Image (cartoon, rainbow, N blue to C red):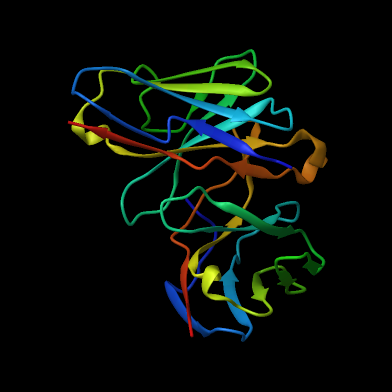
Amino acid sequence: DAKTTQPPSMDCAEGRAANLPCNHSTISGNEYVYWYRQIHSQGPQYIIHGLKNNETNEMASLIITEDRKSSTLILPHATLRDTAVYYCIVRVFSGGYNKLIFGAGTRLAVHP
Amino acid sequence: GAVVSQHPSRVICKSGTSVKIECRSLDFQATTMFWYRQFPKQSLMLMATSNEGSKATYEQGVEKDKFLINHASLTLSTLTVTSAHPEDSSFYICSARDLAGGWADTQYFGPGTRLTVL
C-alpha cells in the first residue's frame, strides 16, 4: 500500500504558485520522497525527490518538514501545461528492490 | 537524457492471442526495470520487477504465467501478455532505474502501451 496521502484535487490560477501537499507520517529514516506527474494517457514524468533537505530544480521545489512526516511540492509559476495528476511517493525497499508504490495522487487543474 | 521508450504505443488484438510489449532505456543502462498496469481513472499498479539476467519477481496477485517478462540486456525488457482476454485491456507502462544515481536512483517511465483485447 502507498504510504502517502494527498488531496484528490486542487485548482490553481495560471502564473500563480501551485503548492501541493503530501502526508507521509509512516516514512522511515532512509526512505526517499519522490514526486511524479502524469498528463493524460502518458507515462509519469519525474519531477523531483528528496530525503531530508529541501530540494529545487528547474521544474519545482520540494519542501520536507523537519520531522519528515509531510512535504510540499511547489510549482512556482503554474502554466496550463502543468495540468496533470501529481503523485507523491515514498520509495520503499521490498523484495530486494527500491520500489515506487503509487497512491491516488492529486489532480491539479490550472486555469487561465 | 534518461529516455525510456515503449513499443508498440497501441495494440488491438483478438481474445486468446499473445501480445509482446518492449521497453527500452535509450541513453542509459538499467539492470532493473519495472512494469505497471493502469486501468481507466485509476493509479498505476506495480506488476513486477524485471532484473537483467535473472527471473522477474512479481507482486502479489499478478500471475507470472500470464505476464511473461524477459530482461535480456541492460537496455531491453519485454512483457508478453499470454492468451489475452478483454479484462487484460489496460495501459501498460514500464520504468527503468538509472544506475548512475546511486542509492538515490530515479526511475524513468516510458510513454505507455495501450492494449485493447477484443
Name the residue nearer the viewer: A102 or A17: A17
In percent of width and height, residue B84 lies at 25, 24
In percent of width and height, residue B105 lies at 74, 42
Q: Is residue A73 above or below residue A46?
A: below
Image side of residue A98 versus residue A40, left or right: right
Name the residue nearer the viewer: B13 or B81: B13
On the image, which quarter does residue A51 sit in?
A: bottom right
Q: Is residue B26 above or below residue A107?
A: above
Number of numbered tags placed on the structure image: 0
On the image, which quarter does residue B63 sit in?
A: top left
Image side of residue A51 versus residue B11, left or right: right
Give me the residue at 56% from left, 22% from top: B77
In percent of width and height, residue B103 lies at 79, 41
In percent of width and height, residue A11 lies at 47, 82
Name the residue nearer the viewer: A80 or A101: A80
Image side of residue A65 versus residue B112, left or right: right
Give me the residue at 50% from left, 21% from top: B78
Give me the residue at 77% from left, 46% from top: B104
Give me the residue at 67% from left, 75% from top: A74
On the image, which quarter does residue A36 sit in?
A: bottom right
